[in-house]
Amino acid sequence: MSEQLDSRLTKPLRKKDFDLYCLILVGAYQLQNTAIADHAAVTLTVEAARHLGKQWACGLVNAILRNPQALLEPSVEAQFEAPSWLIRSIQHHYPDAADNIFRTNITRAPMTLRVNQNRQPAMSFAQILLDQGIPTVPGELSNALTLVTPQAANTIPGYSKGWFTVQDEASQRVAHLLAPKPATRVLDACASPGIKALQLLEAHKDIHLTAIDVDVTRGFYGVSESRRLGLPFELREGDATLRNWWDGEMFDSILVDAPCTGTGTLRRKPDIKLHRSHEDMFDLQRKQRELLSNLWNMLASGGTLLYSTCSILPDENDSVIQHFLDQTTDASTVPIAADWGRATLFGRQCLPIEGGPDGFFYSRITKL
Ligand SMILES: C[S@@+](CC[C@H](N)C(=O)[O-])C[C@H]1O[C@@H](n2cnc3c(N)ncnc32)[C@H](O)[C@@H]1O
């Protein structure tokens, strides 16, 4: 919208008139995005300029807002508040879905709960919530419930008793796809803050879980969550591109929930659009490759490695797996049969859905 306004100003407003600049933006926003009558939006914005003591600007405000059609057709970048490298990449990879992704990314993300089925089935919990005036919609996973109207987690019944965890359904799928066998050794190699590690412990009480992360400071949330949920979560500091933290015993399952651009979660973290650059994506790709190639040495024969990202960019997803498979003779992907997301060469890609889950990628690899 600033881009549109700048195009209408023959010369930029002075620094001390920044209040006026913001005021015109508010007026333009009302014209374009609200049900406020056009004449009311214009008149009140002009009036507000007068209140600011900027009588001289009333004509200017009026001229700009009276003719909103003359405001330039916003660029895709301006319309969807995203940088051009990301817009181009999404258009390139998802020509059929790009506009939908852009539109979804500027909507509010849903609030989904992972119901702790050790306490009660999801349907019983949904009834408890409904009785308290909190309607929910069941997800595709049996213990996922989405709140019709989001509210603070600690105001939802059962919060302090550990009856649920706030977790997007796309993120919940990771542990379901890893599905470790009873009493096996499991590694969560990028575990901070610990949401998926806690989910694994909640669903598979008898696994031997090692959870490491290069940044344990982010793990404080997981540690406090583990107390609330009554789960024995321990996060160790370790760089998963190295082996100095490893005791040499093979793991039966490894989760690589890799650091990524987070481009599937822009509704929740819109700052990514400002802070992440195209170059960052290639740095992350290098890290993702390093993680896979190092962790593969720790997987037992017949074991499963699940690679996941909350990115929708194939450079961080299929390309990383392709590179890994090209270098690794004893690896083979296991197809993920599902009626959600879209099949890719080496896994499954979810795109963000309006009112639904985030964008996520999953690839399941077995050691021959
Ligand atoms: C997507 S987040 C993981 C989220 C986590 N699995 C959860 O569900 O709460 C990626 C994590 O990878 C970690 N990371 C980045 N480089 C790493 C490395 N070399 N070794 C281990 N962890 C790393 C980051 O610190 C970050 O916590």
Image: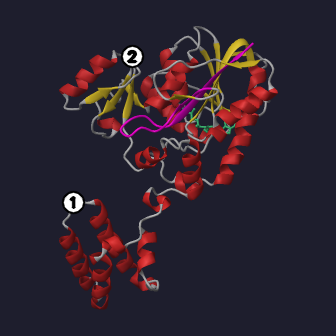
Residue denoted by label 2: 117
What label does residue 35 carry, if any?
Answer: 1
Tell me which label, 1 or 2, sits earlier in the chain.
1
Identity of the residue furthest to the bottom in this view: 56
User: Looking at the image, which residue is at 70% across and 37% down?
Assistant: 288
Badges 1 and 2: C-beta atoms under 8 Å apart?
no
Magenta-drawn segment? 347-368
Mark 1 to mark 2 CA distance (whole Å): 44 Å
Identity of the residue furthest to the top in this view: 182
Q: Front-most of 268 and 46?
A: 46
Q: Front-most of 325 and 113?
A: 325
User: Looking at the image, which residue is at 36% across and 23% down?
Assistant: 163
Q: Mark 1 near ligand 1 (CB under 8 Å)? A: no
> Mark 2 packing: few (<14 Cα in 10 Å), some, or many (20+)?
some
Q: Is residue 268 visible?
A: yes
> Mark 1 packing: few (<14 Cα in 10 Å), some, or many (20+)?
few
Locate residue 99 relative to residue 60 in the image: left or right.
right
